[in-house]
Image (cartoon, rainbow, N blue to C red):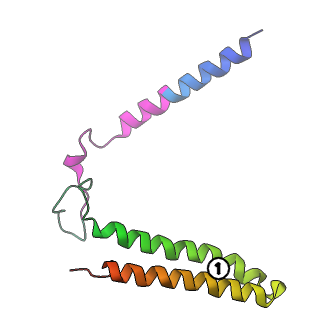
Amino acid sequence: MYVGLAAMMLLAVLTVVGMWLLGRATAVSADPIDVLPFQSGWRPAEHALSRFHARWYVATLVFLAFDVEMLFMYPWAVVVRTMGIESVVEMFVFLGVLLVAVFWARREGAFRWA
């Protein structure tokens, strides 16, 4: 009665154990510090998991804002002809809101790199 369920559970456990063993067998090193990647031929000055300065978070948010803008502009470009002038006005309102965000980010110093 439960043979199919037991077989699926056994298959799932064997798959997980097999993947774990495969990962252990093909791992380069247990300590990632020993196998640090090179950056343009130079050894990295700090660990890859080190903390970043807070100014990078604001720059990242600005990048994501423009990335999301492009997500909205691609489908808009496909339907702009069928939707008419209303869609053009809506897109310029959207771009205006993003421009306000850019001015805010500039005022906060997100574009100062020193």
What count of labels does the image hold? 1
* Residue 18 among magenta residues: yes
Kindly identify the residue that appears in the image at 19 percent across and 62 percent down: 44
For label 1, the residue is 73
* Residue 5 among magenta residues: no
Answer few, some or many: residues within 10 Å of disc 1's Cα (few below 14, many 20 plus, some between 14 and 19): some
**Picture quarter with the C terminus:** bottom left
Quarter assignment of residue 70: bottom right
Magenta span main SS: helix
- Boundaries of the magenta span: 17-38
Q: Position of residue 99 (x, y in %)?
A: 50, 85
Quarter assignment of residue 46: bottom left
Horizontal side of 109 relative to 94 (left or right) equals left
Kindly identify the residue that appears in the image at 34 percent across and 40 percent down: 27
Q: Position of residue 9 (x, y in %)?
A: 62, 20
Kindly identify the residue that appears in the image at 21 percent across and 55 percent down: 47
Horizontal side of 109 relative to 15 (left or right) equals left
Quarter assignment of residue 95: bottom right
| Secondary structure type for disc 1 | helix
Say which of 96 and 27 sits in front: 96
Q: Where is residue 20 in the image (x, y as percent from the top left)?
A: 43, 31
**Picture quarter with the N terminus:** top right
Kindly identify the residue that appears in the image at 48 percent across and 70 percent down: 64
